[in-house]
Image: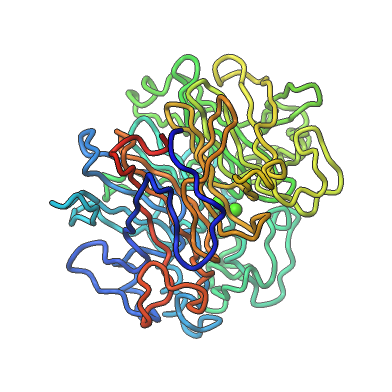
Amino acid sequence: MDFESIPLHFGDRPAISPDYEFSTLIPWGTPINSSGPAFSWPVTSSADQEAQIGIGHDGMWFFAENGSSDSGWLCINHEFGRTTHVLDKPVPETVEDVRIMQAAHGNSVVKIGRDQRGVWEVVDDAANRRITVNTPVTFSGPAAGSALLENPAGNAPAGTLNNCANGYTPWGTYLTCEENFNGYFGSTGGWTASAEQARYGFTNAGFGYAWHGFDPRFDLASADYVNEANRFGWIVEYDPRDPDTPPVKRTALGRAKHEGCALTIGRGGRAVAYMGDDQRFDYIYKFVSDRNHRSMLARGMSPLDHGVLYAARFDEDGTGHWVELSLNNPAVAAGFSSEDEVLVNARIAADLAGATPMDRPEWTTVAPDGTVYCTLTNNTQRTEPNPANPQAPNPNGHIIRWTDSDRHVGTSFEWDIFVFADDTVGTGHDFGSADGLWADPSGRLFIQTDGAQPTGANDQMLVASSATGEIRRLFGGVEGCEITGIAVTPDQRTMFINVQHPGNGDSAVTRFPDFDPSLPPRDSTVVITRKDGGVVGS
Ligand code: FEO
Ligand code: CA
Ligand code: CA
């Protein structure tokens, strides 16, 4: 790292290191093709919103066109938007209002490239598309075809929800992860949560989206859609370049409030995925494919359909163990009789298997030396510490790391804590509630925050050296936002990050990025480059 760190940042506009510059790209409402409808607010047409970039910019990845660092496809998650922010009303009043909200969620795929001045812009392309809560999807893996994923209504699987962080595979696909899906369901009456539904946090009111009053798919009381809730909470894979194949929900990776999915290749060419489940006292998961990913793909099999799912147990002596979540594990078999039940209720399987309850596991990333890092964002409700989560309560969080045996495919690991956020307070690189995390090929860790900073400053992106632990602040967001999502071009000279929920959607706080009195604040991607054209983070 050789850039000037910026001070704690406040106010309604972003700030970046003087060695860097930034511009904004694809704010919420940008047409995904040039013939599309221009943004107007409040949004009054679901057809318009379906032809525009969604809201709640979160995880994303850049898929280069023939290795180019000037042209490629950006896949981006649209985690959530407040109803007031999108519709300018507290709750939907019609089915069309619900359809607008559903169209604002999901994913966007857009081709982007540099124009003649070198500025990144959207490029018209046949692959540009929206994936929303109503887009056809399919299920694959051991739980596909399970009765637990079928409804009496016979409705085909559709949609992805609350897409938080992400992953990407060496075979060129994008992984989008469904996090707080429970909040979109509610009950019109006469429903009580099963033990399984309670474990995933379903309630009568949900998070207040009130879709269930207009769309029975989201009504927990509807006998016709009794298993709709089981259709969310998955890792979803699609090929950005292939708009004709529906996204696939990979059931072998289990159902949880999936934050992200960091995929690496382990011993024997096996695909290994690390995943956080962001809830207080929930778990870190790992999936290992059965065989070499190349030979599986050559035989038409997905490496993400056949393998073993584990959850992490952190022991006091600095070692840990991946506990298997299948009927092969007697502790899991004591509670379940079939593999699909285990995967649909992966959290409960991990409870039975004795995984370690963590302080809200968010993003995971695999550094070039094989060390895996995971942000544990915070846990204000912890009263009993455990070795891996020693602070009770833990309002500012920490970052844990481990090294797996047998080049990622083994069931034991060694772990330690990379940094406690509390230890940064007063150092100048103060941060709390780390969330987004990405290790570059040189071992720099990009750390993004989401939540009340210990100093009251805006959320931010910092860069840490995994070798020395030194931390510098590269970017400061706007008031009321979180900073999330990381994508880079192959040459690492352009980085894309996101300002999510600027001003929490309140125009009185900020009107980023337009600063136009007729427009609300808009979630937006931010393009970061070094002024001298160097690698971002250096
Ligand atoms: Fe969507 Fe856990 O952040
Ligand atoms: Ca997050
Ligand atoms: Ca978060």
* Residue toward you, 425 or 44: 425
Q: In this figure, what is the number of numbered marks?
A: 0
Q: Position of residue 235 (x, y in %)?
A: 50, 44
- Residue 392 appears left or right of 182: right
Q: Is residue 226 visible?
A: yes
* Residue toward you, 89 or 254: 89
In percent of the image, x 70 and y 66: which residue is there?
203
As displayed, is residue 266 above or below residue 331?
above
Q: Quadrant of residue 387?
A: top right
- Residue 248 appears left or right of 48: right
Q: Is residue 83 visible?
A: no
Q: Quadrant of residue 338?
A: top right
Q: Residue furthest right?
A: 384
* Residue toward you, 254 or 122: 122
Q: Position of residue 384 (x, y in %)?
A: 86, 44
In percent of the image, x 54 and y 51: which residue is there?
7
In percent of the image, x 55 and y 38: which residue is there?
253
Q: Residue furthest left?
A: 116
